[in-house]
Image (cartoon, helix red, strand yellow):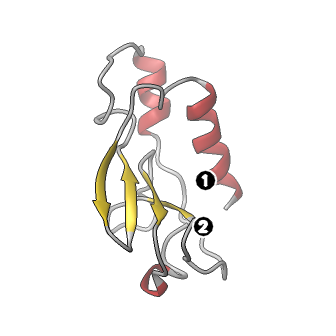
Amino acid sequence: APKTCEHIYELFALGLYDTNHIFRVDRGFVAQIADVVGGRSAQIFDAELRRLAAASVPGEFSDVPHVRGTLSMGRFDDPNSGTSSFSMLLGRAAHLDHTYA
């Protein structure tokens, strides 16, 4: 998922996850990191950084299985709606295969 990885890496490099948090933990399933616009405790970014953080990336799906340790892009029902929330898989989640980056 090259575009997804590039987007998340850029947000990290800009420090946008520095005051973010894990907002959801489902034992054996996921630990989900909040999106950087709504999940931050420090409001230090300007309009350009807010635009970048809220930008969605196209759905990029592969044959990589969702197993423990996999990072998976969070999104809404629209497969192209991922912005900056992602999850770390805590166990096998075959139902996410081919539908989440």
Q: Position of residue 93 (x, y in %)?
A: 45, 81
Question: Residue at label 2?
Answer: 60
Give the quadrant of residue 15: top right
Q: Position of residue 82 (x, y in %)?
A: 44, 55
Spatial CA distance of label 2 from label 1 is: 7 Å
Tag of residue 61: none
Question: Residue at label 1?
Answer: 4
Q: Position of residue 27 (x, y in %)?
A: 32, 69
Q: Residue at x 31, y 59 (%)?
A: 25
Give the quadrant of residue 45: top left
Q: Position of residue 33 (x, y in %)?
A: 39, 48
Vertical comparison of 48 with 22: above or below: above
Q: Residue furthest bottom?
A: 94
At mark 2, the secondary structure is loop
Give the quadrant of residue 40: top left
Quadrant where the C terminus is found in the figure: bottom right
Q: Earlier in the sequence, mark 2 or mark 1?
A: 1
Q: Residue at x 47, y 32 (%)?
A: 17
Residue kind at label 1, given as amino acid type: Thr
